[in-house]
Amino acid sequence: MENDAKVIPIQAAPYNLSRQAGEAENMLDHIVDDFPDNPQSMAYFYDLFRRVYCHGDEVKHEGMLVGTTCIQAPEELIYAFGATPMRLCNGSYHYDQKGADFMPAKSCSLVKATLGMLNSETVIPKIGKPDLIVNPTTCDQKKKASVMIEGMGHSVYELEFPNVKESEASRVYWQRSVRQFAARLRELTGKKLTRKNLQAAMAKTSRAQAAFRKLHNFRRKSPSLILGKDAFLVTNAYFFDDIERWTDAVEKLNAELELRDEAGFKAVQSKAPRVLFTGSPPIFPNLKLPLLIEEAGGVVVTDETCSANRMLYDMTAVDEWLVNDMVDSLADKYLKPCTCPIFTRNDDRRRRLLDLVRDFNADGVVYQAFAGCQVYEMEYRSVADEFNKAGIPMLYIETDYSTDDKGQLSTRIEAFLESLKNRKKHRA
Amino acid sequence: MKASSPRLQALRDAVNHVHFNRFRFWFQLAAFVLFVYGGYLAIDLGSRLPFFACGYNQEGRAGVCYLLPLQHQLSLPWARLFSYAGIAVLTGFLIFALWFIFLNKGWCGFICPLGTIQDWLTSLRRRLGIRYSTYSHGQFAQLTKVKYLLLALMILIPLGIGGGLFSHSMSPPFCLICPARMILPMFTGDFSQFTIDFSSSAAMVMTALGISITALFLVGSFVKKRFFCFFCPMSALHYLISKPALLKLKKDGSKCTRCGDCYNVCDMEIKEIADDIKNTNIMTDDCTMCLKCVASCPETGALKATFAGIPIFESTEAGFIKRMGKGVQHGK
Amino acid sequence: MSKLYLCAIALLATLSINGYCEDAPAAEKRFGQGGGRPSEAQIAEWRAKREAREGQAATADAPSPAGSGAHGDMSAMSGMTGMAGMPGMKDEGSLRSGRSGGKPSMKGMPEGAARSGGRPSGMGMRSGGALWLSDTPPMRGDGARGGRSGMAGMDMSGGGWGKPAVKRLWLRAGNDPQRSGFAQEDADAQVETLLVTPDGKPEGEPLPSASDDRKGLSFEMPVQGFYRLYLTSRKLQGDILNVNVAKAEVANFGHGGDVEEAARGLQATRYSESAPLEIVRERKPDERKFFQLKSGEDQVFIVLKKGLPLQGARVRMVSYQGWSKEEVSDEQGRVSFQIVRDYFPPWNEFEKRFKATYLLIAEANAAETGKYQDKPYTSVRYQASLSGNYYPSPTDYLSYAWALGVGMAILLFCGVAVYLYRRRRVKPYQEERFHEGK
């Protein structure tokens, strides 16, 4: 008998049935369904993430696509050249595992996930192939990723970023880097940088920042009007969403929060411990930790991470709206207020944390460090000392993108929140 | 926190959200008209003013810069200077100090006609689309000392004249090389200072130096914001007595993110304004108290101008967003 | 007739770099044609000649080869001086040289003769010249170095802390501001001294008798304003009564001080109705506290008799160097003089604030009858004097052209240098530049 067994061609499973989509879907469902009073304007963001991460819909963009691996790449310049910036930092565990081929086992999930994403054939978010990937020379792992990304067939621009930010020399050095970056973009796009297009680009960003700051200020209210998991989702959307659509949606959300405020709405119980989130950035779908905090009855009132606050908070001031002055001012904004742990000193980060705790009336701090993210791990001590001195409790959590430790983390977080509650009661 | 009435709060908000550069432009213009043309309206505020209301503007001046009478007094014969005339020097200085204490270096940033002219030159350059120059960090550190040197010379040379060591043609030495002497009278149609005096060699050297510095001033302040203020001996004198001043520039370091926005807009390139988070009294010797830093600070309450301890102009997030929003649209 | 328009020298106190780099021959030529000004050399020569002539005058009033001075050069000088006193010389608008010349009432009494006796012989017309009040005593040597008194003519000569300023005046006789000696006391003349203070009686008060130093008349000036001192002397000579009024006007203003008091002082009346004859310097409309008369300016004086304008008075102005000019007052009593520039030292000796004294003498005769000291007289000869100071024109030695030249050169040089610097020199890390523009 002849072997007439049919060869069944292996068909790629549709994306929405993939493990990756499942991971995102699962997270999004938790975010949406576990909480009763989500703001209505959050529907835009829930929908956006569902389309992009669960259905694999294409993310459209205008002009050339410039991928960035860090918030240190000045997006205003990219917009000014008519290109669209897209933040490539990824939060998917699926990509984290794929990216493990490139990096040592104990290295940062974020970098691994980004590498994994860039190396895969179905890139989610589906942004298409970037015309240029800008990789600022920040932490070691990102620095070393440059060559690997290049090896995947991408064109990479290494944006030189200083390790010290206090000195005038590094400021001038960085201004030069930014100028050279603009020259590279000019080469890439064939367009000129003019006062008009740079102003238009800065207007876009500053409008988005103003909207963000308004949202940020609403989170000062106690009890909270909005939960941290929603806020993280909003800022995560900034990575890939159209900036103007994003700003419109945030402004709508702000309007709703204003109404909530007037109505005396409480998104959480009055006694819910208020938490400041700092350390390695939560990026969808890895919103594991913020979600755990809020599921346990706490509320993340603010954060000091590069996927949210640090990305959108600092605004540019320009004295003379001439191209040269604008570019230098932009450079200053990207360097001087930065609280990234890659710098030699972290005085600014510690001051910023204390300021946030004070301003947002936070009861405690949760410090997330991705296993292998050495700079955050190394800064733990100095930050802990600072909070110790100030009498602010802090929970340090070393984790990664896997969900294996969820149970154990949940216990630790609940205990921490309980201690915060007790402290609060004790004080009152 | 003090409870303040809603009306007071509304007023504070209105002030803090003001389109600062425009306000300052009109304020400076008004002060310029007052001090350069006020003499025609018989306004006379005396000769102890702590800014360059040039006394050589005979017709229009509404008061006289203190440096002119100071140098004259110091060049009195020593026998007189160190006896009864010394008291006149002291009372003169006291009146000057009283004027000064009122606005501190705000006289420089808001009133001084020569400062205003520099701002006009700056805005001319900006309109022409020419970028400004900056000093390097090293140059800054060296050049910032020049004003103290000029202040010392401004005191020592008149003393030397009084003691017979130098020619009277050199008196008043600083005025002779001050660009205000030539430029301000021109605004009232008096070009008589725009000359070289050949009546003696000292006069010739001084007036030639004066004309050269005026030319330098024009070039310098065209490419460099507030070029002359950096070397102004009045500025040095101000700083030496600035402690009891009523108007103060305050900084709350805990609210500062060191974003450098203030440093970026600073005409005088003062790095401390952004980086110093320890001193609450942030005015440095180069500062002109133009308060542009306050207007360009996005952190509510990080920078503020206080008058006798009462905040009068404070950095606010809303004010910043409003001002920069206008800037990004209109390029001003 | 020689037409030496010496007054043209005054015209030069204007624009540009006069007095700095002109060579003598060229100046001489222009001078001859009524333009330009005399050079240092010329002035020295004139002075020498004048001196020489005075020496001759002591022996004989010899007319020199008159009329030969038709040329506009130096030889004309002798002719001119020779004709001193002749009516033809009184052509208006010209300024004549000669210390004793041009005074019709001299009546062949050369001043030199009087002086050769050692002293001016008393007061009055016949003596060594007019009687006048000066704020400087007679000179030894040359050159009254103007007291450098503060900026822009500020009078800083206070009398010490809290004490009012004290002014001291000297009574001098003579027709030349520099050469006049102390006035000799004349036993025959009756002298009366009145001081008018800004806040005192308008007709003045007698000045306390002079102190030990008889030649000095001192008074305190406690308030701001103009102090006027009238020294009137009367003397009968035959049936002619000589009335001489020497007047001094002293401005006393300070910095600061009472503003209203100063304003009042500036506005106050500046003549006396009791003065038999007086000369008043007309204020310019824009005069302020520290007014200084400068070479090259026009100045109007008014001759008043008992406070009323006097027409037809002969008024002579004598400059510091002895140049003089005579005018006759108009129906308003006004005479106008241009203040000449007669200060031409070598460049390195030039004093910007050189204080020069001018002397003004007004004369008028009147057929008045009356009795003086019980003796009758049939006519009165009035003479009034006023002295004042003038200073080099502030525009002397000032050069706009040079200033403009130097200024423009530096402006251009620096401008280009900055431009090239900014264009060429690539500041470290600034090599990437963007073009401003649309």
Image: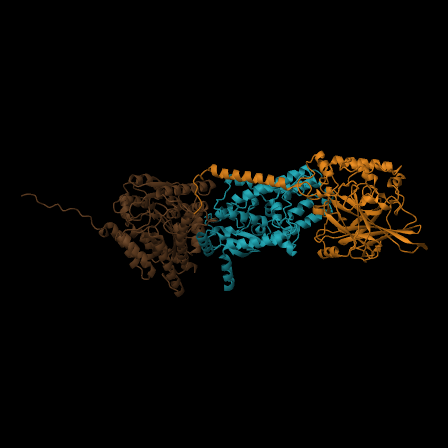
Which quadrant: the C terminus of chain A? Answer: bottom left
- From what the image shows, is residue A228 above or below residue B7? above
Q: Which chain is brown?
A: A
Q: Relative to the observer, which residue lies in front, C186 or A223?
A: C186
Image position, residue B179 (x, y; %) = 60, 44
How does the figure colour the protein chain or chains?
Answer: by chain
Q: Is residue B101 left or right of residue A259?
A: right
Q: Relative to the observer, which residue lies in front, A184 or A272?
A: A184
**Residue A391 is at least partly visible in this image:** no
Q: Relative to the observer, which residue lies in front, C356 or B262?
A: C356
Q: State the count of labels.
A: 0
Classify residue B153 by image quadrant: top right
Q: Which chain is cyan?
A: B
Q: Which chain is orange?
A: C
Q: Is residue C159 left or right of residue A213?
A: right
Which quadrant: the N terminus of chain A? Answer: top left
Q: Relative to the observer, which residue lies in front, C1 or A346?
A: C1
Image position, residue B154 (x, y; %) = 64, 42
**Residue C228 is at least partly visible in this image:** yes
Image position, residue A92 (x, y; %) = 29, 49
Q: What residue lies at 30% left-to-right and 43% top-to-bottom?
A: A115
Image position, residue C392 (x, y; %) = 72, 43
Q: Residue furthest bottom?
A: A263
Q: What residue lies at 74% left-to-right and 40% top-to-bottom?
A: C343
Q: Residue furthest left?
A: A1
